[in-house]
Amino acid sequence: MKIYTKTGDKGTSSLYNGERRDKDDAIFEALGTTDELTSNIGLAIEFLEEDSIWGPHMIDKLVHIQCLLQDVGSNLATPRQKTSESRLARTAFDISHVSKLEEWIDELDEDLPKLTQFILPSGGKASASLHIARSVCRRAERRIQPLARDDICDDSVAIFLNRLSDFLFNAARWIAHKQNKPERIYKKF
């Protein structure tokens, strides 16, 4: 199978339901941003591979999240108004994924020093790359919010991304803490 199809050469692309839309459509903006998020998480995983003690604990969670982000993409590529019930059922995003993130956030939180000041993205390569992923996640959330509001995607997708940015923040802090890498503190100049 060839990687190129030439069907998008005129500036449109296809959704899961077969509908073609302009490549700069809000759905493709959201899909592109979640893809960018997955790639940034992949970079963080590569940095974590260098840490044989703490890396595996976090890598398993991050790979799980990358898989869930593929499911987010499937949900986004299946607009609710113009899609058959069977396709909607196949791409529904289960709200229980949010509970799993909350569980992981709480686990990490128990192991972290209390946050009393604003921190800057820092704490080593793995931590800093997780902060980049967090900021991309916030952008993905902003791209998806109008789609959820207009009932184009499941509300659970927007909620998941909101919680995911919290997880990525705690994950960045946790790995910096475990690797004994200092987090830079915000100072007003």
Image: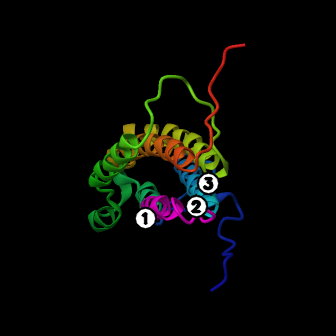
Residue 152 on image: x %, y %: 39, 47
Q: Is residue 118 above or below residue 70?
A: above
Residue 150 visible in the current orientation: no
Is 48 placed left or right of 18 in the picture?
A: right
> According to the image, label 2 marks what residue?
45
- First-in-chain label (2 vs 1): 1
Give me the disc on residue 40.
Answer: 3
Give the residue furthest to the front.
180
Residue 68 visible in the current orientation: yes
Q: Is residue 87 above or below residue 58?
A: below
Residue at 32%, 59% in the rendered image: 92
Q: What secondary structure is the magenta-colored segment mainly?
A: helix
Q: Is residue 110 above or below residue 17?
A: above
> According to the image, label 1 marks what residue?
17
User: Viewer-proximal residue, 170 or 90?
Assistant: 170
Q: Amino acid at mark 1?
A: Asn
Q: What range is drawn magenta here?
A: 49-68
CB-based contact (under 8 Å), mark 2 and mark 1: no
User: Viewer-proximal residue, 138 or 176?
Assistant: 176
- Distance, label 1 to label 3, CA atoms, is 28 Å
Q: Quadrant of the C terminus?
A: top right
Residue 111 on image: x %, y %: 40, 43
Q: Quadrant of the N terminus?
A: bottom right
Residue 22 on image: x %, y %: 61, 53
Mark 2: few/some/many CA within 10 Å (<14, 14-19, 20+): many
